[in-house]
Image: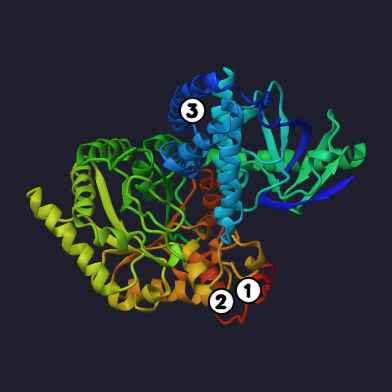
Amino acid sequence: MKLLGIGASKGIAVGPVKVVQEAPLFERRTVSEEEKARERQRIAPAMERARSELQALESRVAEELREMIAAQLSLLDDPEIADEIEARLAERKNAEWAVEEAVESIAEAIAALDDPYLRERAADIRDLGKRIVAALLGLDAPGIALQEPAILVSKDLSPSDTAGLDASLVLGFATELGGPTSHSAIMARTMGFPALVGVAGLLESMQGGETIVLDAERGELLIDPPDAVRAAYEEQAAAQRRLLAEQKSKKDLPAVTTDGHRVELAANIGGVKDVAPALEWGAEAVGLFRTEFLYMEQNKLPDEETQFAAYRQVVEQLAPRPVIFRTLDIGGDKGLPYLELPKEENPFLGYRALRFCLNRPELFKTQLRAILRAGAQGKARIMFPMVATLQEWRQAKAYLREAADELGLSELPETGIMIEIPSAAIMASAFAEEVDFFSIGSNDLIQYTMAADRGNKEVSYLYQHLEPAVLRLVSQVIEAAHGAGKWVGMCGEMAGDPQAIPLLVGLGLDEFSMSAASLPKARERIRDLSLEDCRKLARSALACRDAAEVKQLLQR
């Protein structure tokens, strides 16, 4: 039997199924008036246990998933969830039932939103509900215990499901729900597991005890295939594992082409917990430190000392490698409950990132001072996100100068901007006269260039980094920077895509920053390339008229 899905993380896995169970079962009952107060008193301890578990969970999940944990923590302080629970307690529902209904009400509202990325966050909210109910029942925290290697099969997978997993026993994931930006997909890409999401009819096709083939290259899942078919897939999976082990063994080799052209391979991180994996996979630098995660983990604005302590640890552990600090990037899909950001019709085009920081100079300078102080312990660089105009850049640089003056510092670290808005790419030559470097945020640059929500399946055909319009903007930015003697990095998913790497080398990209697990494959790819061949390929790609032509060019 064959099922079809979306290949969210490439690769092949063969093995037994482990079906992940749904939420814990409990009795839904109407309580007496006398019991209402007791049920109400049970809620606060359960919420606090959930908070403690989530805070502990943050230390065990990958950087890409920490944002989801932080979102669940913020929900615990959201008055809406408290009000929804209270309303159901007033209806004399027992505590477990009240929590279940309250969380489901909020999740359904989010699932009905137009934004596909935000819709997928409904699963994270339901996960929080499962955790609180487990606490009320006195059960262990949600999680999956594996005794042998297996492919996980579930309706969906949450941070709770996967945080405590023994990665050596996970062969791959398959889920009924979710898309390319779901937790399951992000988790699989981060840890290097093959994964299929959006597999219709998955659970109803499983009786237990099946052996399956998960082919994320073709988007197929085979249930109990013939022995010959299974053997062929097992050999393919084994070959992929051997290749990855070989790539990882070369982590200390430089990323240099066959004709001697050197580029830098860097990692994207969200905090000190991500430093060790980055070094393990051979990062030469940090090309993106997402500082907003520190804010999302707090119940209030972190003060200068809190930020300094966190930043210093990262800089010290990576020294003498450089670390690029992206200043606070909130708004869009990332909120902070204690800041009460305004509701917006289109938050991705609204009051976010640098736009917010420029309107809150004291908050902004607090972070800048913390970064400047941490930089004294190693090599820090500063990068401003979502810059659209020179005026924004100059205003941000002025605040940085003020922060340095307040600390008695005469010299500033290297300071640059993210290129993620087309206006900045078009004006790159003007920016290049003033900044120290560019870092291309390819995810948002593609989204804004193609007017295509990166989480929307209906327009996914437009969200492609091989579109000539995107490639030409990237080329324009690199040419402008090099013309002014500046360097250019890239910190979006495009930087770690083996198919795109030859084009980026040919266009002259200096730094490739990606998830740590992507570094070995990128290093091997670059070491097999010739700069001259890449330049010819890039010139041909820039002359193409659509992404299909570029793909055909790369397949020759």
Q: Quadrant of the C terminus?
A: bottom right
- Check disc 3 and give the amino acid type: Ala
User: Mark number for residue 50?
Assistant: 3
Across and down, in percent, residue 242 comes to 67, 39
Quadrant of the rendered image containing residue 252: top left
Badge 1 local density, few (<14 within 10 Å), some, or many (20+)? many
The residue nearer to you, when weighing 429 against 290, is 290
Q: Residue at 32% of width from left, 78% of height from top?
A: 429
Badge 3 local density, few (<14 within 10 Å), some, or many (20+)? many
Residue furthest out toward the left: 408
Q: Is residue 474 visible?
A: yes
Task: Write down the residue under mark 1.
Answer: 547
- Check disc 1 and give the amino acid type: Ala
Residues marked 1 and 3 touching at CB (< 8 Å) = no
**Pair 1/3: label in front:** 3
Residue 301 vertical placement versus 493 (above, below): above
Quadrant of the rendered image containing residue 175: top right
Task: Write down the residue under mark 2.
Answer: 468
Disc 2 from disc 3: Cα separation: 48 Å
- Check disc 2 and give the amino acid type: Pro
The residue nearer to you, when weighing 172 against 376, is 172
Across and down, in percent, residue 74 comes to 42, 40
Disc 2 from disc 1: Cα separation: 6 Å
Residues marked 2 and 1 touching at CB (< 8 Å) = yes
